[in-house]
Image (cartoon, rainbow, N blue to C red):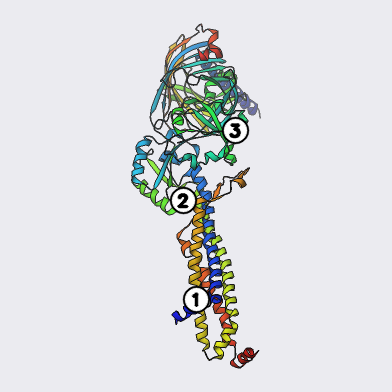
Amino acid sequence: MKTIPFILLITFSLTGKAQLSADIILERVDKNMSSENRIIESSMTIHGRRGSRTMTMRSYSVGYKQAFTEYLTPVREQGTKMLKLENQLWIYSPSTDRTIQISGHMLRQSVMGSDLSYEDMMEDRKLTEIYDAKIIGEESIDNRKTYILELTAKVTDVTYNTRKMWIDAERYVPLKEELFAKSGQLLKRTTLSDVKQIDGRWFPTKMVFKDMLKQGDGTAYEISSIKFNQQIPAHIFSKASLKM
Amino acid sequence: MIKFLIKGLLRDKSRSRLPVIIVSVGVMLTVLMSAYIRGFMGDVIETNAKFTNGHLKVMTRAYAENAHQIPNDLALINVRDLLTEMQELLPGIEWSPRIQFGGLVDAPDENGETRSQGPAIGMGLDLLSAKSKEIERMNLSRSIVRGNLIQKQGETILSEEFAQKLGVNPGDNVTLIGSTMHGSMSMYNFKVVGTVSFGAEAIDKGAIIIDIEDARLALDMFDSSSEILGFLKIGYYDDDLAVKTAEGFNARQDSEDEFSPVMKSLSQQGAMGQYVQLTSVWSVYISMVFVFAMSLVLWNAGLLGGLRRYGEVGIRIAMGEEKGHVYRTMIYESIFIGIAGSIVGTAFGLFFAWLIQKYGIDISGMMQGSSMMLPTHIRARIAPPDFYIGFIPGLLSTILGTMLSGIGIYKRQTARLFKELEA
C-alpha cells in the first residue's frame, strides 16, 4: 500500500517537470520569434495550380499590435498597403484610392492568393500568452533534434485551437508547425528553414505555408532582410500613411 | 363505295360539317395544349439556362469539378481563340462568355471611408458588344427598377434590394472587393447607373452586374472567362442535341489536361439533369391526361352522331340494306370525318401553337413580387408528337364512338322498325 503514494508522487513530479520544460521551450521560442519592433523585407512566392507568382513587400511592426506592410512588386500589387492596429485591419488599393477595413469573414480570406489568411497575419501574440504547451515527443528534422510540442489554446480569441510544433532542441526555433481546427482537422502546415542568427537571436528566414484545404504547392516566404529594435516613426502606423 | 360515301357526306352538311367542326376543335385544343405544356415546362428550363446553365456550358475540367465554388483561378484562358474555334465547329450555337464572381460591394462616405458593405454575387456579361444578346437573354431592359442599363465601361447595375440595403442610388460610386484570377485581393470602382429586380430572392439579395471587360480588368482575367454559355439557335433546349453536341466537342479535347475545356449540356449540370428528366416525363403525363379527356369528349360526340342517325339507319334497314353494310358505312364515314377533323384541327392547333411559340404570352404582370425565378413570357413549343397526337382523340375516339353507337343496329328487329316508321 505504501508503493501507491510513491508512484503517484513520482508521476506528479515527472508531469510537473515535463510541463515546466514545455513552458520553458515555448518561452525561448517567443524570445527568438517575438520582438519589440522589426522591419522585414521579404518575398512571397505563391505556387498555384497554374503556375507561380512572386511578390515583394516591406513590413514594419511594433509588438503584436501594430503592423504596416507595403507591396513593392509586381506592378499590379505595387502600392497596396495593409495596416493593422490592435485587432483592426485596413487595406489601401492605389488603383481605387480606397481604404477598406477587412472584418468578419473577410479575415479568413487568403492574402494575395497565398496560403496565409488575414487572420494568420493578424495573429502575432506571444505563444506563451495564448497557449498551454506540453511535450509529446521528439523527432529529427534535417538531422536536427526537435521537441514536439502540443499547444492548446488557453484563450478563446485564437485562430487555431491547437498547434503542433517541432522545436529545434538547440536553437529554440520552430522547424515545422501544424495548425488544427477545434474539430481536430489539420488546416495548415508550415515548414521553416534557413535558420540564421540575427542580432543575438535565431530566426528562420525561409518558410513554406501550405493551406491543407487548398490545392497547389503552398506559399514560399523568404526574408531577404530583417532588422530588430529599429526606430520606426509612429506616423507609419496611422491610416494617413496608407495613402502616402 | 368510298366515293359515294364522301359525296354523301359533302352533300349532307348535317352529317359532315358539325362533326368535322367538333373533331377539329377537340384536336386543335389537344395539339395546342400539348405544345403549350411542353413550352411552359421548357420555359423554366430556359430561364435557368439564360441565367446560369446555358443550353451548353464550356468550362475547364478543373473548374467543372467545383463549379459551385466559382473557382476563377481555374477559369478558361485564351477565350478568343476558343470562341473562334467553337463558332466554326458548331455554327448552330450562340456562344456567350461570362465571368461569375463573389465579393464585397463597399459604398464609401464623403471621406472615402466605408459607409456600408455587403456580400455580392457578381456577373460579368457581354453587355457592350454590338452583336451580344445578353441584355435580351437576361431580360435586363424589363428588369430595370431605377436608372438605366450599362452604357459604357466602369458602370454597374445592382439589384434593387441590394442597393437599398447599401443605401446606394444611381449615380453613386461603389467599390467591388473581390479576388483576382490569381487569388490576390482586387478592388475596382464602379459607378452605379441602375438597379434591377429579377424576382428571384437568391439573385435579388446581392447582385452586381458589370460588363465582362470590366470584370476582366477588375479580376485580372485578361482573355479569360469563368465559363462560356452556349444557346441553341433553334431557340429552346433540346436535350438529345445538346448531349450529342457536348459529346462531340469533348471527344476532340485532351482529357488528361485539367485545364482543357469540357462541354456540359444543361442536363449534365447538377440538379438540372433531374429537372430535365422530370419535365419530359411530366409533359407526357399531362399531355396524356388531356388527350384522354379529349378522347372521351370526341367519343361521346361520335356516339351522339351515331344515335342522331337512328331514324335514317332504321329506314335503310327497312329498305333491305344489310345491317353489317350499314354498320361498315357508318364507320367509314366516321374515318373520313375523323381524318378531316384531325387534319384541320392539327393545322389550326399548330398555327396557334406557333403564334404562342413565336410571341409568347406575357405574364410579367403576374410575376411582380414573386420569389421564384420564372419566365415573364410563357411560350409553346412545337415538337414532332404535335403533328400526330391530335389523331388519337380525333380519329380513334370518333371511330370508337361510332362503333359503339352502331351496335344498336344489330339489336333492331325489322318488325319493330316498321312500327317505329309508322309512328
Q: Which residue is mark 1?
A: B10
Where disc 1 sits, the SS reads helix
Going by the numbered disc 3, the residue's amino acid type is: Phe
In the rendered structure, the answer to whether residue A2 lies left or right of residue B61 reads right
Look at the numbered discs 2 and 1 and tell me whether their residues touch, using CB distance below 8 Å. no
**Residue B60 versus residue A57 in the image, above or below:** below
**Residue B54 versus residue B302 in the image, above or below:** above
Task: Answer with mark 2 or mark 3, whichever residue precedes in sequence.
Answer: 3
| Discs 1 and 3 lie in a common subunit | yes
Q: Which residue is mark 3?
A: B162
Task: Name the outermost residue toward the top.
Answer: A231
Q: Front-most of B94 and B248?
A: B94
Residue A25 x/y as whole percent: 53, 18
Where disc 3 sits, the SS reads helix
Q: Front-most of B289 and A34?
A: B289
Q: Is residue B293 visible?
A: yes
Rendering quarter of residue B203: top right
Going by the numbered disc 2, the residue's amino acid type is: Tyr
Q: Chain of mark 2?
A: B
Residue B343 x/y as whole percent: 48, 67
**Residue B318 versus residue B396 in the image, above or below:** below
Kindly identify the residue that appears in the image at 36 percent across and 49 percent down. B248
Could you say which disc has been placed on residue B237 in the image? 2
Q: Disc 1 versus disc 3: distance between alpha carbons?
A: 68 Å
Where disc 2 sits, the SS reads loop
Rendering quarter of residue B108: top right
Q: Disc 2 versus disc 1: distance between alpha carbons?
A: 44 Å
